[in-house]
Image (cartoon, rainbow, N blue to C red):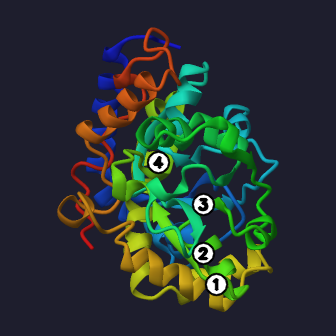
Amino acid sequence: MMKTASRLSELGAAALLAVGAVGTMSSTAHAQEKFTYMTNWYAQAEHGGFYQAVATGLYKKYGLDVTIKMGGPQVNIVQMMAAGQAECVMGSSDLQMIQMREGGVPVVNVAAVFQKDPQVLIAHEDVKKFEDLKGKTILIASSAQRGYWPWLKAKYGFTDSQTRPYTFNIQPFVADKNSAQQGYLTSEPFAIAKAGVKANTLMFSDQGYPAYATTISCMEKTVKDRSAAVASFVKASMEGWKSYLADPAPANALIKKDNPNMTDEQLAYSVAKLKEMGMATGGDAATMGIGIMTDARAKASYDFLVDAKLIDPAKVKLTETYTTAFVKDLKVLP
């Protein structure tokens, strides 16, 4: 792995050439180029734009034969990508991928669909704000220790002794009125409401949590050697997201095929939340286009990880962790 900023500028130059070529690709490509993208969980509305680009032929329009593979709780998608089983993966957040890079996997963030991280804490109705959670039991997954938990501790004075393991089951929260649990804005709050429990949802990004979410993250070698394919994938995916938020039906049919446990009701709830909160279309995306990443936001994520001692800046440079070359001129406006 090359440890120089020039490496990423080299990748950026290749990417810009590739982005310029995308516009003509649909008319010049003959054989569809195979391209695999792995998501980070079972198929759901939060993956909708990618499924939409398959369902509506957007990837084919740009010369790609795309396969979407589902992740899940026991699937190490970065490991599988490093082993050549996918070109790019869906990072839960840019923070996660920066940490992977520090750990020795040369992964690069090339786009971010969600301008805000949908991570939330869900609390019973007596809790109105994060400060009200002091002293209460907070159910979090082990992965939170390398993400939002150090941020919450620093900001609100929470302690490790408050935490218990979150097992992706809402019943412990439902049973204990003195508890809160982690969740995803578009998922667990729906399940908890369905269970008849009145709860409040507290969103990290509303309080300054810097992370992007739902990234397109690729191996550095892929970004360099297959920059035209990556550019096509990014462009088609963002057009897919714009299309999905307008009419999710084509993608939803594929989502339910991949994940038969997914219901129409859950999909409708999630899409409504994505739109209401401007997850893909708000923030910088409103004026710069869906999928945008900015240097300022990338630096904020990196600086948070350094300040929280979650990465060693001597092991990974900010400039190695991302490139804006694939998104800065796309302008897929909502």
> Of tags 4 and 2, which is closer to the observer?
2
Dot 2 amino acid type: Pro
Dot 4 amino acid type: Ala
Q: Where does residue 202 sit, x and y in percent of width and height? A: 47, 64
Residue at the spot of label 1: 193
- Residue at point 29%, 41% (across, down): 297
Residue at the spot of label 2: 189
- Residue at point 72%, 55% (across, down): 71
CA gap, disc 4 and disc 2: 37 Å
- Residue at point 73%, 67% (across, down): 173
Q: Is residue 210 left or right of residue 272?
A: left
Dot 1 amino acid type: Ala
Q: Where does residue 231 sit, x and y in percent of width and height? A: 39, 49
Residue 229 is tagged as 4
| SS under mark 4 | helix
Q: Are marks 4 and 2 in contact (CB under 8 Å)?
A: no
Q: From the viewer's perspective, is residue 298 above or below residue 212?
A: above
Quadrant placement of the C terminus: bottom left
Q: Where does residue 193 sit, x and y in percent of width and height? A: 64, 84
Nearer to the camera, 219 or 93: 93
CA gap, disc 3 and disc 1: 36 Å
